[in-house]
Every structure is written in structure tokens, then in C-alpha cells.
């Protein structure tokens, strides 16, 4: 793997996992030393992250991890709802029912996993659901659009990690989506997806508001 790709992958993961928090300055000297790369490949990595909206380079010579604001999250979910509700409809018409039957069973068992602190395993299961949805669609153009949304969603989702009760409800919502897709019920799959997205957005916005007395006052790209 090239040094720039290695630096990009490491920093991307740290941003998505909230190990590098929004607003964190990204000093080239410090990062190059920590990642064990020279400044040239590091700059290439930061440029890629800036294009994806994960790094903000508009504030001066030193980039910072981009903010996660209420307004940017709301914008993201508007696009996500349009893409994912239609994806659920299409998946209900095109999927292998056995795949979503298995996922429904695993989401039904997820609450027990979450109650013992298995949030990482739960997010891995959600990732498998996303992959199954992509396979059912069989449309690489659609998948590219979904991937662009999911990149930022991966970071936004982590805001809900501190709310285990919400994650338990999310598991049940995913189970209902999987069941509807498995049964070929396109209308119910889309409706269940809408319910899930609205509940997720509400949780994230409420959590941000609890952290910031003036929600939406931050500027940035989620």
C-alpha cells in the first residue's frame, strides 16, 4: 500500500470512529511523525479527506476535522431518505429472500448483544445490511450514490452510541425493514425505512443539542 493510501486509511478511520474529534487541528508535522510517513504523502491523504468533506481546509494553513452540525446532518438525511427509501423498494423486488431472512433473525437477536455493550458488533451488522441492500439493487451507479452518503453517516451514527436504548429500537426497525424486503413488500419496506430514518435523525439532533446549547450554530460538513 502506498504511503499516501496508508495515511488516508488511518486518518479516515480515526475521523469516522471519533478518535479525531470535530475541530481537531491536523498538524502535518505531528501527523507525519505519528503515522510514519513523509509530509508529501500526508498532504495527498489530507487532500482526499478534504474532497470527501471530512477535513476542512478553509480556516487557514492547518486543516481541521470538519464539524458535525445539526444543519449538515439534516441536509444529509434529506438525501439519505430519498436514496434509501427507493433502495428498499427496489430491494424488495429484486432480492434473494434468504439473505434478508437471515439478517432479520440477526437483528432480532441484536438487543441482547447491545445490552452487553456490543455496539461495534451491531454497527458491523448494519454494514452487512448495507452490503446486502447493494447486492439486491445490482446497480453500481446507485451504489456509488449510497456510498457517498454512508461515508458521512458512519460518523453521524456514532453520536447515537451513547444512547443504548435508541440502538435497541434501531435494531427492531432494521428487523422490520429486512422482513418487508424478504416478503417482497416494497411499500412496507419504504415506509419502515422512513420511520427508521426519522427516528435516527431525531436522536442525533437531540444529542447534538444536548452537547451544544445553540444547536446548528456550528458550520461545517458532516
Image (cartoon, rainbow, N blue to C red):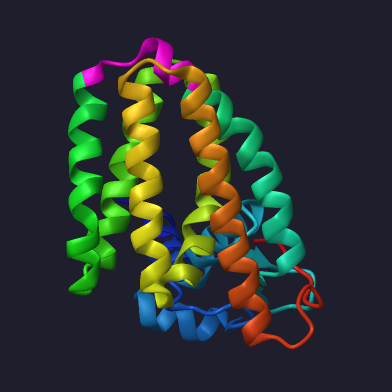
From the viewer's perspective, tell me whether residue 220 is left or right of residue 153. Answer: right
Closer to the camera in the image, 216 or 46: 216
From the viewer's perspective, tell me whether residue 95 is left or right of residue 40. Answer: left
From the viewer's perspective, tell me whether residue 192 is left or right of residue 107. Answer: right
Q: Is residue 37 visible?
A: no
Q: Where is residue 48 in the image (x, y as percent from the top left)?
A: 57, 53
Q: Can residue 133 be seen in this view?
A: yes
Q: Magenta includes 92?
A: yes
Q: In which quarter of the image is residue 8?
A: bottom left
Dominant SS in magenta: helix
- In the image, what residue occupies the spot 18% across and 40% down? 105
Say how many tags the image has. Answer: 0
Work out whether 29 lies above or below 86. Answer: below
Q: Where is residue 81 in the image (x, y as percent from the top left)?
A: 62, 39
In this view, the residue farthest toward the top is 93
Q: Position of residue 6 (x, y in %)?
A: 36, 59
Q: Magenta includes 118?
A: no
Q: Quadrant of residue 47?
A: bottom right
Closer to the camera in the image, 125 or 169: 169
- In the image, what residue occupies the spot 48% across and 78% down? 20
Q: Position of residue 4 (x, y in %)?
A: 44, 57
Work out whether 181 lies above or below 200. Answer: above
- In the image, what residue occupies the spot 21% across and 28% down? 101
Q: Tell me the quarter of the image containing the C terminus.
A: bottom right
Q: Give the range drawn in magenta.
A: 89-97
Amino acid at each position: 500500500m502506498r504511503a499516501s493510501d496508508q495515511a488516508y486509511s488511518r486518518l479516515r478511520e480515526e475521523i469516522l470512529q471519533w478518535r479525531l474529534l470535530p475541530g481537531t487541528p491536523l498538524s502535518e508535522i505531528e501527523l507525519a511523525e505519528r503515522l510514519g510517513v513523509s509530509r508529501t504523502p500526508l498532504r495527498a491523504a489530507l487532500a482526499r479527506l478534504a474532497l470527501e468533506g471530512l477535513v476542512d481546509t478553509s480556516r487557514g494553513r492547518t486543516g481541521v476535522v470538519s464539524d458535525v452540525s445539526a444543519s449538515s446532518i439534516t441536509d444529509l438525511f434529506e438525501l439519505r431518505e430519498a436514496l434509501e427509501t427507493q433502495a428498499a423498494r427496489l430491494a424488495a423486488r429484486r432480492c434473494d429472500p434468504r439473505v434478508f431472512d437471515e439478517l432479520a433473525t440477526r437483528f432480532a437477536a441484536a438487543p441482547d448483544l447491545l445490552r452487553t455493550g456490543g455496539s461495534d458488533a451491531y454497527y458491523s451488522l448494519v454494514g452487512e445490511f448495507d452490503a446486502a441492500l447493494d447486492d439486491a439493487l445490482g446497480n453500481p451507479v446507485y451504489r456509488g450514490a449510497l456510498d457517498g452518503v454512508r461515508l458521512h453517516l458512519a460518523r453521524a451514527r456514532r453520536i447515537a452510541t451513547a444512547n443504548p436504548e435508541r440502538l435497541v429500537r434501531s435494531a427492531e426497525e432494521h428487523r422490520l425493514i429486512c422482513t418487508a424486503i424478504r416478503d417482497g413488500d416494497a411499500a412496507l419496506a419504504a415506509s419502515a425505512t422512513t420511520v427508521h430514518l426519522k427516528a435516527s435523525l431525531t436522536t442525533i439532533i437531540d444529542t447534538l443539542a444536548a452537547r451544544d446549547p445553540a444547536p446548528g450554530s456550528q458550520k461545517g460538513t458532516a
